[in-house]
Amino acid sequence: MGSAGNSTDGTVGERRQLINVAYRLLGSLTEAEDAVQDAYARWYGLPRSRREEILSPGAWLTTVTGRICLDLLGSARARRERYVGAWLPEPLPDRTEWARSGGADPTVPPDPADQIVLDESVAMAFLVVLESMTPAERVAFVLHDVFRYPFAEIAGVLGRTPAACKQLAASARRRVGAARAPAPAAGQVDVVRHVKEAWQTKDITALVGLLDPSAVMTADGGGMVGTVLRPVEGGARIARYMVAVADRAPGLELLERSVNGVPGLVARRGGAVVTVASFDVSDGHVTRVWVVRNPEKLRPWAREGQGVRAVVAGGPLS
C-alpha cells in the first residue's frame, strides 16, 4: 500500500494511525492494541534486508494490521455467540475533557485510548452499525470510506479484486445509509442532561417524555457484573426500569462525560468508573441507550479524573 521511504524508524509514527484503523475495525481497544502489536512484531521479525526492500513500511504495516483484524473479525462472531448477554463496542473517553477537569497525571504512561481520534466514525451508533456488516464489508468500508484508502490497496488486504472490494464497500454503505445521522452535539448535551436530572429525581413522567416510545436500551455486562441480558424495548418500559432500579443503587456518582466523542453519562463508585452509557438522540428524544458495565471494557476509563460536576445518584447504571 502506497510508497514512502525505507527507514524502519518511519514505522514508529504509524502507530497512532494503525490503532485508529484497528479500533474502528474491531470495536475493541484491547484487541486493536494487540493487533497493532502483532503487526509490529511481524515487521521486526523480518530480516533487515527484507525491511529495507519495502518502499513503504507504514503501508506494509497497514496491510498486515488489516489482515489481522479481518481474521479477528471472523473468529469474533463465534466468540460472541458464547458471550453472556449483548456485546457492545468498548466505549472511549475524551482524554482532553478529562485533562481539563484537572485529573491528568503526567506521570502515568500514555494510554492507547489517547491515540484514538474521536469523530463520527467512532460514535457508538456508528460502531453498532459496523457490527452488522460482514468482516470483508467492514474492512472495505472502513479503509475506503473512513480512511480513504484506494480499492487497489484494499484489495491487498482482502485478497480480492479492486472491483470486488468496491462492491463490498457499496453494500456496507447501504447499511450505514439506513442509519440516521447523529444529532448535533449541542442538542444531545441538553437531552442527556435532562435524562440525568430526571433519573436523579426518579421522575418517571419526565423520563417517558425524554425517551422515544420505541426506544431500546442494550446493556453489556459480559457475564461479569449484573445487568439485563436482553434489550429493554419501549420508552415507557425503559423509564420504569430506570426508576425501579434507582433505589437499589444508592451512592453512585453520576457525571456528564463525552463517550466516543458524543455526550454521555458515566457512573462511579468509590472513585472507580463502573458504568458508561451512551445515547442516540433524534428530534429531542433518546432513541437508543447503550450501557457498558463489563469491567474489561472500562479499562480506558480507569484514570477518569475528579473534575466536571458530579452528583450522587442511583439508577440502571449501577
Image: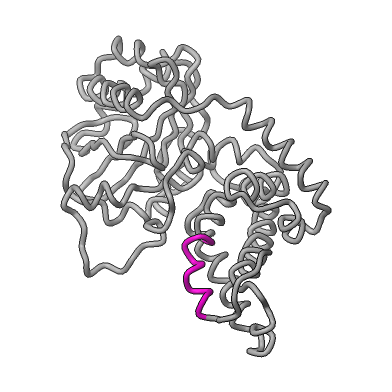
Residue depicted at x 50% and y 55%: 20
Magenta region includes residue 256: no
**Front in this rendered view, residue 201 or 153:** 153
For the C terminus, give its image quadrant.
Answer: top left
Q: At 69% across and 85% down in the image, what residue appears?
A: 50
Q: Is residue 304 left or right of residue 232?
A: left
Compared with 253, 6 (above or below) is below
In screen coordinates, is 103 left or right of 54?
left
Count of marks overlaid on the render: 0
The segment highlighted magenta reads: 9-18
Q: Quadrant of residue 171?
A: top right
Q: Which of the two residues, 140 or 230, is positioned nearer the viewer here? A: 140
Residue 224: percent from the left, percent from the top? Answer: 44, 49
x%, y% of residue 300? 37, 55
Q: Is residue 15 left or right of residue 157?
A: left
Q: Main secondary structure of the magenta part?
A: helix
Residue 106 placement (x, y as % from top left)? 21, 66
Residue 104: x %, y % from top left: 21, 58
Quadrant of res 5: bottom right
What residue lies at 48% left-to-right and 16% top-to-bottom? 234
Residue 13 is a magenta residue:
yes
Q: Nearer the viewer, residue 154 or 76?
A: 154
